[in-house]
Image (cartoon, grey):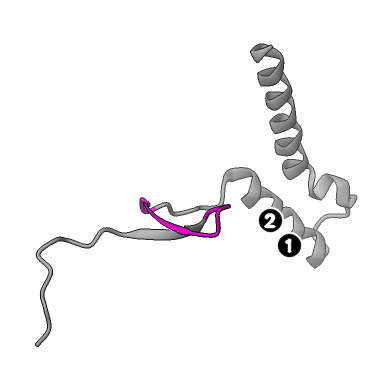
């Protein structure tokens, strides 16, 4: 005969810890959507491949490069402000 548990199961994921063990942690429904700059880059890549634009590849990937540069600047400023 099967036993029934009266508690509700929570949505969780298993993450490996450095000790080699596992722990359960609650997660939320995190849906990742494509952001504006990622969508813009995708449009630029498709336009470049299909021949609609004759830009250099550096300009095609400029939105992603811009986001990376902004993230680096924010990290540098954050480290500078902490010290």
Give the labeled residue for mark 1.
46
Residue 28 is situated, as x and y percent measured from the top left of the image, at 36, 50
Other-residue count near label 1 (Cα within 10 Å), few / some / many at <14 / 14–19 / ≥20: some
- Label 2 sits on a secondary structure element that is helix
Cβ atoms at labels 2 and 1 below 8 Å apart: yes
Give the labeled residue for mark 2.
43
**Residue 83 to residue 2: above or below:** above
Q: Tell me what residue is drawn at x 31 percent, y 59 percent.
A: 11
Alpha carbon distance from label 2 to label 1: 5 Å
Other-residue count near label 2 (Cα within 10 Å), few / some / many at <14 / 14–19 / ≥20: few
Span shown in magenta = 17-29
Q: Tell me what residue is drawn at x 64 percent, y 14 percent.
A: 82
Q: Residue furthest bottom?
A: 1
Q: Tell me what residue is drawn at x 80 percent, y 50 percent.
A: 60
Q: Residue furthest front?
A: 19
**Residue 21 to residue 79: above or below:** below
User: Quarter of the image containing the N terminus?
Assistant: bottom left
- Quarter of the figure with residue 54: bottom right
- Label 1 sits on a secondary structure element that is helix
Q: Residue 10's mark? A: none
In front of the other: 33 or 43: 33
User: Quarter of the image containing the C terminus?
Assistant: top right
Magenta stretch, overall SS: loop
- Quarter of the figure with residue 31: bottom left
Q: Tell me what residue is drawn at x 66 percent, y 48 percent.
A: 40
Residue 76 is situated, as x and y percent measured from the top left of the image, at 73, 22
Side of 71 relative to 6 (left or right)? right
In front of the other: 11 or 40: 11
């Amino acid at each position: 005969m099967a036993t029934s548990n009266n508690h509700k199961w929570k949505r969780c994921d298993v993450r490996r810890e450095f000790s080699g063990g596992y722990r359960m942690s609650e997660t939320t429904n995190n849906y990742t959507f494509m952001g504006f700059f990622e969508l813009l880059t995708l449009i630029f890549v498709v336009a470049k491949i299909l021949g609609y634009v004759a830009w250099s590849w550096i300009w095609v990937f400029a939105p992603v490069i811009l986001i990376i540069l902004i993230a680096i600047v924010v990290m540098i400023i954050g480290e500078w402000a902490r010290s």
